[in-house]
Structures are given as structure tokens and as C-alpha cells.
Image: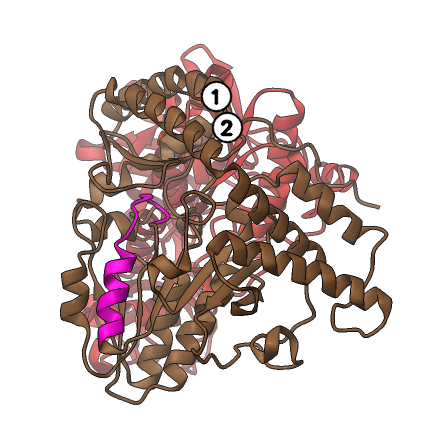
Chain colours: A brown, B red
Amino acid sequence: MRQPVESTPVRGVYFDNNATTPLDPRVRAAMLSWMAEECGNSSSAHRFGQRAREAVEAARAEVARLLGAAPEEMVFTASGTEANNAVVRDALRRAEPGDRLVVSGFEHPSILAAAAAWAAAAGVELVRVAPGPDGTVDPERVEAALAPRTRLAALMLANNELGTVQPVAAVAELCRRRGVPLLCDAVQAVGKIPVAVAELGADYLTVGAHKFHGPLGAAALWIRPGVELAPLLVGGSQERHRRASTANVPALVGFGLACELARAELPQRVARWRALRERLEGGLAGLTEVVVHGAAAPRLPHTTNAAFGGVLGQELMMRLDLAGFAVSTGAACGSGTIEPSATLLALGLSRKRALSALRISFGAQNRLEEVEAFLPLLATELEALRGIAAAGRA
Amino acid sequence: MSSRLTAIAMSGGLDSSVAAWLVARSGVPAVGLSMLLWDQSSVARNGRCCGALDLGDARRAAAQAGIPHYTLRMDEEFRRHVVDPFVDDYLAGRTPSPCVRCNTFVKFDLLVEKARRLGASALATGHYARIVAGPDGPELHAAVDAQKDQSYFLFELSAEQLAFSRFPLGERTKREVRQMARDGGLAVAEKGESMEVCFVDGEISDFVAREAAARREGPAAGGASGGARVVTRDGRELGTAGPYYGYTVGQRRGLGVASGSRLYVLEVLPSENTLVVGDEADLLAPGLVGERLHWIGPPPPSGALEVTVKIRSRHPGVAALVRAREGGRVEVEFAEPQRGVTPGQAAVFYRGERVLGGCWICATLAE
């Protein structure tokens, strides 16, 4: 028998919470009973099934409450990607050649890549609206892109790499006047800022549990009452015929509690993040050739994206990782390659500048001491890398 | 901590996985680095090469060794330094040695630079070769396992690069290495050998033809990939073979022409799309002319230097006199005539187990 893979967890400070967050221990405890003694298919008629159904519906109510929505408006999915795909797929299924799709140029790949792949096949024109240099999309540019036959528009609530908050309400109003449904990917924003579907005015909104200390594998799509959506997954009649699949009860129970905790603790979390980020960006200001991206726009309170002149973000990230601090070169989906971030390029930054960027994103677990420990280390690693890079080749 | 950090080049193969395991077990801080060198989608999996990365296996091996692991995308650099020159060589009628170039320009240059930037003070690889301290600095020596020895492919390294390098497998046999992998429960323990050119899936001549066509130049473009004329040294036309770049000096098979005796390729002449053929005896050459002469340590004094030369990776070696000429050119005179002096291959100079340096073969030495 083979020896098991080394099973020691990684020790270190985790500053990559936009990729995913650690599970809240309270959420874990709530999930565990559904992974141990409890058993039930929420579609079953017996008492086991009834109890599972009750747990799932309680979770649905909590997710809805966090968004100011009604429980029956929420469709559970296995991921934000699935929820976004479902909306894009449905819009294109009903589209005719010559119709149009309008998306911001830095949407998540679950919208951008899905739209690109399926629009071409359907003969639908895909219009990407570039964000401005401040990291936000100008509603006027979206308006200019909307055409009479636009089937769907998509604008994220907050950008995953920059944290910049987008003018969704203004764009939703423009879309509403033209009868264009709007998809709002709020995966990065929910749990970080107050989100109310009524104020945003979108027709679809996606949210994922693991971005705010809930479990992986649980997400939801909010659908405005009266808006149709053909299911992406076809099978049983779960989720009011809008998404077939046996409910993932433990994950949904965790999702519900994560929403409840986020709602109750948001003010304290936001206050903490503001303090951490103020300290972080104050420290960055003391380093030479470091520029924070999107700082002029409204931003999520926990995200900092900055360029570190003279180095490759990937190399600095690896040095920091080896020294015990996890940060990101950009979207996790794009890591592992040395292509510059498409989001940063969309802002009009040079390739070199985009390649020098790092993203630092806090979670509810992070403490000021961690930032205090990080800053001198960052300065040391940055200087060391700049020295080697200057001595070697660019 | 980073002052003693050792980086390990990890391909996902058995050898580099065991090298990583050994470094990690020695207790020094270690980090695994894998290079994404070539689009894998077109290349069949298992058992290919060192370069063509089995990323999943490399990750798994790093996890089993308990070390962090990063993947570095270097496909543009690999194409520039290895793949394009490989195609250039075939189109020029030479038979290249891409593994040498990969070591010289990719693993021990670009990857070493990456390792330095991560704060590493050494780069370990799974090569079968040894680094031995000598009076003039580190020396490159053949591996203990003569069957697996890869010192030939490392002849272009400098003493400075050797000082940064570690070859944990150099003192071990392949059998021992595989046994270690089994004993350690490594997932790659039963993985096969890789002998082919890692980025070529199928026939080399087809690959060269595709690449040449993609460049829209060279004899393979525009349907000009016609068969090469097959002629003898005295000018007799024997017929037509495949495109000239599908042949290498010393090759006997695939000529497709009938003759009373066994015929061997003696020369490949791209400008005339011609293969010169002859008897086995005609393959024997008294020496070679080389270029881009390289010494690992300080260059030896001028004059004839006695060495053992290997004129291809599996060559047993022959005693020879090396005479350096102007501009990196060199003449190598064999103690006994050798068959198969092939332009494009490396000629590597040994003294005993030690690699002194080498050159790239351009031609046979005139008698």
C-alpha cells in the first residue's frame, strides 16, 4: 500500500480571500451533522426527507434575506459559474442570428468565455464594453452598446481582481428602459458590502457561498419574479423546475449559516477590513514604485490590487508564499500562467505593468498583526527581487 | 530561510520526482519548479520526456515530497531556444541534439535565473551526472550508472552553472532510483523511460514538414517537399527518397532505392535536395570539424589536447586529439576512424569520467 500524500495543512497567513475563504468554524459545525448522523434527500416524502427539506428551505430563506429577496426567487446551484452559465445559455437559446449580447470587458470567465463560445455558435453579436482606467464601467458606454435586439446585458457588482464596485443600478435602469434583461454577477460583492436586489434593479444576480466563509459547492441565482429561465441542468423537478439535481444538503446548510453570519456581522467585518487595508495601503505608499489600482473608484473594503514596479508579480507572489504569505497575481482561474491579467489590460495598463501586479484580499479571519508582519517582509522580498532582477535580465 | 533554499526542476518523470524526494528528505528548504514548455494537447501522454511536462505527476510528486511547487510557463522561450533551432538544423541537413540546447538555454539558464529570483541558492535536477569539486572549481563527471549517464547533454554548462547545480541521482543507478521511488511510495515509481524528442509526436520528418510549412518557407512549403535525389559519391543517380530532412548521416533504412549492396547516407545536401549514399566503409571518418567550442573550466593551453571524444550520446567514445582554431572552430582527430560523424550532433570531450567541454559537429575532417 502506498504511503498517503503528506497531509499537513499549509501554515501561513492567507491573504487571497477573493479566490476562496476559510470555512467559518460555526458553518463547519452546522454542516457536520449533515455529513455524519443526518441523512435525507430533500425531495423524499418521509420524515428523513422532510427534515432535509426543512434544512434546505431554512438555508434558502437566509440566502434570500441577505439579498433582500424572497426565498422562492432563489435557485440553488453548485457554483457561481453554473449560475452565470445558466443565464447566458438561456439568453442565447432564445436568441436569433443578429441579436446582441452586451457584457463588460472584465466579467468573470463564467460569463465572458461562455458568451464568447455560445454567441458565435448562435450567430449572436457579442459586444464587450471596456472599463475605464479607474476600474469601473461607464454606464454611458453600456447605453451606447445596447441595441434593440440585445438579448442580455451583464455587469458584475464588484470586480474580482480590483474590488472596484460597478454602477449596476444605473446600468440596470438603462437596461430596464430598453427591455434588456441584466445579469449581475455579485459573487465577489456579497458578504463584503450590503447588497439588496431591489436597489440594484438587475434581473438575475449570482452569489457563491465560498467567497464569504461558506462551503465550496454552494451558490445561488436570484431571478426577478416573472422572469423566465430554462434550466441548464434538466432532470428532476427540484428548485421549482429551474435546476435539476438532488440538493447538496450539507453545503446548503453551510451556505445559509454563512449568509446569516455575514448579515449579522457585516458592519464589524467591514470596519476591520477598512482598518487592515488602511494599514496595508499606508505601508505600500512608503514603498517606491508601488501603485494601487482602482483607488479612485468605490471599492470593496477588503481588496487591494497594486503594481510593484520592476518585478514580475508572479515571482513576488512565489517569494511571499515561500515566506508564509499567500497573495495572488490576479484571478485564481488565470494563475499558473504568466499571461498578464486581462482585467488590468482592459484598464489600458501596459503589459509590463499588468505583469507586475499582485492582489491582496482580506477575509473575516485576518488580523491587524498579520498586516503588520506582512509589510516589512514585503519590503524585504521586493527589494531582494528587484536587486536580482536588476543584476540578471529583465 | 531562503538563503539555503534549493529549487528542484520537476518534470513529473520518475527521475526528477526522486530527486525532489531526496532533496526534501535531506532537510533543506526546497521548492519544486515545473516548466510548461510545449502545448501538451497534441502530444500523447505517458512516458514522453523530460521536457514535455506531466504537470499532474509533478504536482503529485511535490505533494508527496511535502514541498511547495510552482509551474512556470516557458513555452515561448522553449520554442525560441530549442524547437526552432531543431527545425532549422533539419532543414539545413543537420541532425540536432535538442536536449543539449534545452539544458544550456532553458534549464540551466532561464530556470536557474527563475530559481535565483525565488531566493534559491541551488537548482537540483534529475540528471544522471556528477558534480565533483576540483582544483579549478566544480567539474562535470559522468554518472555512476554508465547506462543512464547524461553528462553528454550537459557539456555546454559553465563552472558557474555547475556551482549552482545539484544532481542528486549522479551517484545512483537507475535501478536504485526506481527502488527508492517504490520504497517511498511515489506515484511515479512505475513510470516508463522517455527516449524520444519530447515535443515531437510521431515522425520527426512529419514534424519538420509541418513546421516548415507553417513558416511558409523552406523546401517543405508550397508542395516543394519533393523527394530527395539519391546519388553515390561518384555521381550515379540511384532514385528518389523521401524529403532530405527525414534522413540522418549513417542511416540505412527508408532510402527506397535498390542497389546491389547495403547503402548508407553519407551526406545530406539540402541546397540540392540530395542524399549522398555509399557503403558502410565510406562512413568512416578520420575526425571531425566542429564549431562553438566550449570548455567547462578554464580553457586548456593551446596545442593538441588528448581527450576521449563522444560524437553522439550513445557513442562509446574514442581517443582523439583536439586542436582549437580561430573563432571557436576546432579540429578533432580520432585515433581510429569512426562511422557516423553527423553534422548537428555534439562532440563531447572527456578525460576519464570528467567532461572537459565539447563542440558542435559541422563536417568530417578531410584526410
Amino acid of disc 2: Asn
Q: Is residue A170 magenta?
A: yes
- Residue B224 lies left or right of residue B182; in this view the side is left
Given the image, what chain letter belongs to the residue carrying mark 2?
A
Give the quadrant of residue A275: top left
In the displayed structure, A264 sits above or below A130; it is above
Q: Nearer the viewer, residue A338 or B114?
A: A338
Q: Which mark is residue A366?
A: 2
Q: Secondary structure at mark 2?
A: loop
**What is the x, y in percent for residue B216?**
19, 71
Q: Residues within 10 Å of mark 1 (few under 14, many from 20)?
A: some
Q: Examine the rendering and report whether any part of residue B321 can be seen.
A: no
Which residue is more in the foreground, B249 or A109? A109
In this picture, is A81 found above or below B333? below
Magenta segment, which residues?
Answer: A159-177
Nearest the viewer among B177 and B118 is: B118
Residue found at x 18% / y 78%: A147
Q: Which residue is mark 1?
A: A370
Q: Tags 1 and 2 in contact by the CB under 8 Å rule? A: yes
